[in-house]
Amino acid sequence: MFQVFLVEPDMQLNHLLCLYLQKEGLITTSFFNGEKAIKNIDKNPHLWILDRETPTIDGFTILSEVKSKYPDIPVIMISEQNSNIDRIVALEMGCDDYVSKPFLPKELVLRVKKILEHIHGNVKNRNRILLYAEYKIDEIVRIVQKDEEMINLTSKEFDLLLLLVKNLYRTFSREQILKYVWNDGHLGAERSVDDLVRRLRRKMRNLRIESIYSYGYRLLPNQVLKIKGCKTVTTQNEDIQGLFQ
């Protein structure tokens, strides 16, 4: 299931859009102001719907915050402003679609589904389910299960998990992990990496994360690692090789 975050100050429209989205099987969380939305950015939904005229913090500010931290998460902006300037500004800031009011709720739902299906289509031929020991890792929906029970990971914990699981035996320095997980935007000390690893170990105790003294970390296999319906995972993932060259 996909999770959608909706930011819409109009209570009636907020409720109506939630009903339509939920009817399509989308897990929907709604907010009535920008301040609460900003506080939930790190919950990392699959798509945002932002009202341009959101009180306390406007839609453009929320859009900027979302795209600066999670540039790949799609955002649809809805607005009473039908000006070309607003539309262009939103698109230049990374907005994936712009819908002017009034609109039919069904139209918005179709736009949401189209964007999600497009993203899903781009990754449908990539590995989806990773198995490590008793853990089942869905890299598209970004969830981890153990014996059918969910393990709640933060976005950064999940990013680190994917990096290690898809690159067995490969040793990563703390600097490389900072670059991958924080996208070069983190100014903190490399101790942040140690804290992140410690939290991941605590939540997933059967991960064999090995510490490399004064350097970094690597993941060793707990048992044979396979991808559901695909070949065995190699020890080096081509997707991230260029990141550290």
Image (cartoon, rainbow, N blue to C red):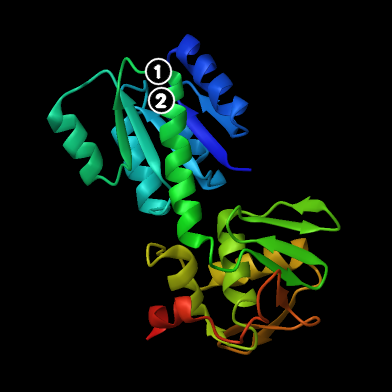
> Of 200 and 20, which appears nearest the observer?
20
Tag 2 near tag 1, CB within 8 Å? yes
> Of 52 and 110, which appears nearest the observer?
110
In the image, residue 77 sits, relative to residue 217, either above or below, namely: above
Three-letter code, disc 1: Leu
Instruction: Work out how far the residue at label 2 is from the one at label 1, CA to CA, in angstroms.
Output: 5 Å
**Residue 104 falls in which quadrant of the image?**
top left
Drawn side of residue 80 relative to residue 206, left or right: left
Residue 88 image position (x, y, % from top left): 17, 38
**Residue 155 falls in which quadrant of the image?**
bottom right
Three-letter code, disc 2: Glu
Residue 207 image position (x, y, % from top left): 75, 74
Drawn side of residue 104 relative to residue 162, left or right: left
What residue is disc 2 on? 107
Residue 58 image position (x, y, % from top left): 32, 28
Residue 107 image position (x, y, % from top left): 40, 25
Number of residues whose C-alpha sits closer than 10 Å to that of mark 1, classed few (under 14), some (14–19) or many (20 or more): few
Q: Residue at x 14, y 30 (%)?
A: 84
What residue is disc 1 on? 104
Q: Quadrant of the N terminus?
A: top right
Label 2 sits on a secondary structure element that is: helix
> Of 159 and 216, which appears nearest the observer?
159
Q: Pick out the residue farthest to the top.
A: 12
Whether residue 33 is visible: no
